[in-house]
Amino acid sequence: MIGVEQWAEIRRMHLIDGVSIREIHRRTGLHRETIRRALASERPPAYRRAEKPSKLDPFKEEIERLLRTDHRLPGTRVRELISELGYEGGRTILDEHLREVRPRFTPRRTYQRTVYRPGEICQFDLWEPRAEIPVGHGQTRRAWVVTCALGFSRAGAGALIFAKQAPDILWGMSRCLTRLGALPETVVWDREAAIAPRGRPTDAFAAFCGALPVGWSICEAADPESKGLLERSHRFLRSNFEPGRSFASPEHFQTELDSWFEKANRRLHRGIRAVPAERLAEEKGRMRPLPERMPETDRRFVTRVPQQPYLRLDTNDYSLDPRAAGRRVEVRASQREIVAVELGTGAPVASHRRSFAKGLTFTDPAHQRLLEQLRGSRRAGPAVEVELRPLARYDELIPA
């Protein structure tokens, strides 16, 4: 058998230089029939090993029958079933055969490429860091990151939260949109419990979107491909952001996360073959500006100040003004602070920086002083005037 180089040389000599087969035979020493076959073949010669019968051949019909019954049947189970019939071959040849024949019995799903207009959508999702975040007082806590990406530019942002409740997630959305600097037409979410359980938006989520206003789109169940915009960002967060970094506090984590997203937005995105930061400048020109004030996402509730003037929130106790005991107050809890004011008068009752550590008690020094003053007044008791009578009156009453 001649090589590819000899085959090409024979064809060049005969077809281009006009050398006869006899002369090629004299120059190369090859048999004339070999030369004729090389000239007749338009494809270069290739070595082909003669096919040998496989140990799997007698069982291929049985394998196809099993796959027709259940196309998801694992290869391990297929091997067990055909081994009962006498199969003694290895696992490798069976797995290779299954890779070839299984698609004939498996309904395959195909996808079309989606192209987004500038400002058309912004997709949101939750990503969970592997390590817990230090929250002070020697404690760490499980956390999540609300992530987002614009469909056209792929520019992204993220916000750290410590609960998957509606106020926390909506605050994360608000911060992400503020970082991007404009409003999309539609926000996309999966069926997160605080956003759209069973595919219907919660009142809190609908109110947030209506206040901006933006539209919303909820992904279908069991459709992970519809959230593909953020998969690449989540892989990079796992492989590039987390390794080699340690965090001292939630604020430190958020600062590092913002810096990482800024760098990521300036890199070439292989999916769109463009730099997200450059596309974002174009996209923001077609997006609506942010409102002067973003929708409020704080927790608000009314409670009555107990005799022991403390408010419990997220397992922590925060002191209240003891003079408001028995009165109703409105509490506003944000991601940064906890504020309480008395209903009706609006008098301040408490103002604390929020802590994400657990099981702690925070007492305002001013509240402690007021408690001590009130306790001292109660111990002294009420002022009682005692009449002082002259001793002569007792002498008159008692005979000598």
Image (tube, rainbow, N blue to C red):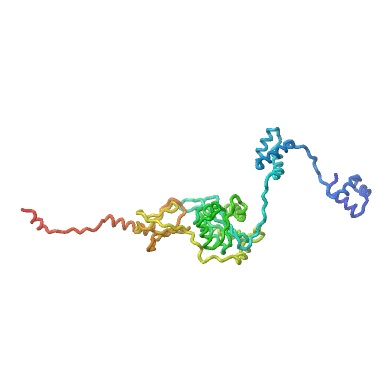
19 on left or right of 151: right
Front-most of residues 113 and 278:
113
Number of disc labels: 0
231 on left or right of 381: right
Front-most of residues 294 and 316:
294
391 on left or right of 239: left
Whether residue 356 is situated above or below residue 279 in the rendered picture: above
Residue 270 screen position, x and y as percent:
66, 57
Whether residue 143 is situated above or below residue 87 in the rendered picture: below
Q: Residue 259, can we see it?
A: no
Residue 120 screen position, x and y as percent:
61, 61
Q: Residue 299, can we see it?
A: yes
Q: Please report the residue visible at 67 percent of the width from the left and 59 percent of the height from the top.
A: 273
Whether residue 88 is situated above or below residue 397 in the rendered picture: above
Residue 73 screen position, x and y as percent:
65, 40
Image quadrant in which the N terminus is located: top right
